[in-house]
Each structure stands twice: as C-alpha cells, then as structure tokens.
Amino acid sequence: MKIYFATGNPHKLKEGEMILRDLKGVKIEGINIPYPEVQGTLEEVAEFGAKYLYTRIKKPVFVEDSGFFIEVLKGFPGSYSRYVQETIGNRGILKLMEDFKGEERRAYFKSVVGYCDEDGVKLFKGVVRGKVSYEIRSKGYGFAYDSIFIPEGEDRTFAEMTTVEKSRISHRKRALEEFKEYLKKRLSSP
C-alpha cells in the first residue's frame, strides 16, 4: 500500500518517513502539491487539506499541520504559526514574552495529521508541552519555533537536540504514532 505525504517541508517529510518506516506493507512517498489552507483550527486545516488532495489524486494521502501555542497569550500564535514566524519571528515572540516569568511561559506544540482515503478523513493529534525560553538557543537543528521551545523534562530547546532526539518526543511523532496504530489495525483486519 502506498500512502502519499503531502508536504513541501523536507524536515516534516524526513521525520514522517523515520517514524513510519517500519510499518509493514506501507510505503510512504512525499508529494509536493500545494493545497489551500483554510483559516481555522489545526483540525479544520488538516481535514480540509486531506480531503482536497484526495479528490485531486484519488490515492491515500495525509497532511500534517502544526502550531505553537503560548498559554498566557491565549494560544497565540496557534494555527497562524507560520505567518507569525514569517512576520515577527522568534525575536518578536520573545519580545511579547519579556514580562512573563516561570509558569507564565507555558506553551505547547500541537500537531494534527489528516488522512484521507476512500473511507473518508481521519484525524490524529499529538501534543508536547513545555515553556518558552528566555533567549534563542540553537545548535543548528530544528526550524521555526524550535529555538525558543523547551519541552517538559528537558533543559534544552528543540533546536539544541538532534533530529533523532527531537523526533523521539515531538508533537509530530505523537500524531504520527497514532496514525501508525490506526494503519496497523486497518491492515491487520480482514
């Protein structure tokens, strides 16, 4: 069974392939077909994207959408994470957060995988909680908000971890693991 992962982001594709590679009977292939991103929750974006692409290619396809949510900012930037990253970036986020200390810096990454095939759309979610760092910290790994996010139980940002280290605990891994379990059950049922 071949399943297409629709993304133009090589980091997402690499992480997806790494997590799903041991799924027997399934081959993941990346495709870069743009699709309209509706304004709404991550769930709405993933559901629309998966349906849209399935109607175009008529083959099993999944998309992944994620966001960075800062609790004290009422979930900002949330599903607008890409736009905010492109406009104010991590320096802008740190500027917004400069008066907040300790527990007020709680944040989380959320990932939603939308999968569509002949049976319709299924959604799979993953969350990793942590906090916003006080400065940009990177060892050259990661992208977007990775250099300002410290996951719970860690003292390093995602950007200070290798791709392998990050993928063990990432929000995308958690969503893809749920997706993987769904596929295993589906493939094992008569």
Image (cartoon, rainbow, N blue to C red):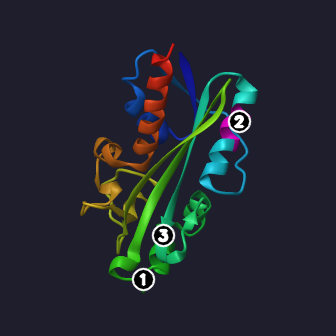
> Which label lies toward us, 2 or 1?
2
Give the Cα distance between marks 3 and 2: 29 Å
Q: Name the residue under label 1.
A: 98
Observer-nearest of 82 and 65: 65
Residue 155 rendering spot, x and y as whole percentages: 24, 63
Give the Cα distance between marks 1 and 3: 13 Å
Q: In this view, does 82 lie to the left or right of 156?
A: right
Disc 1 residue crowd, few under 14, some 14–19, many 20+, Cα 10 Å: few
Residue 34 rendering spot, x and y as whole percentages: 69, 39
Amino acid type, residue under disc 1 in the picture: Glu
> Which label lies toward us, 1 or 3?
3
Q: Is residue 7 visible?
A: no
Amino acid type, residue under disc 3 in the picture: Ile
Residue at image point 38% right, 61% down? 129
Disc 3 residue crowd, few under 14, some 14–19, many 20+, Cα 10 Å: many
Task: Choose the circle earlier in sequence order: 2 or 1.
Answer: 2
Rendered position, 180 above or below 127:
above
Residue at the limit of the structure toward the front, as seen here: 190
C-beta proximity under 8 Å, tags 3 and 2: no
Which element type, helix, strand or loop, lies under badge 2? Answer: helix
Predominant SS along the magenta part: helix
Disc 2 residue crowd, few under 14, some 14–19, many 20+, Cα 10 Å: many
Rendered position, 55 above or below 157:
above
Task: Choose the circle earlier in sequence order: 1 or 3.
Answer: 3
* Residue 24 located within the stretch drawn in magenta: no
Residue 25 rendering spot, x and y as whole percentages: 45, 15
Residue interval drawn in magenta: 48-53
Give the Cα distance between marks 2 and 1: 41 Å
Q: Which mark is residue 51?
A: 2
Amino acid type, residue under disc 2 in the picture: Lys
Which element type, helix, strand or loop, lies under badge 1? Answer: loop
Q: Name the residue under label 3.
A: 70
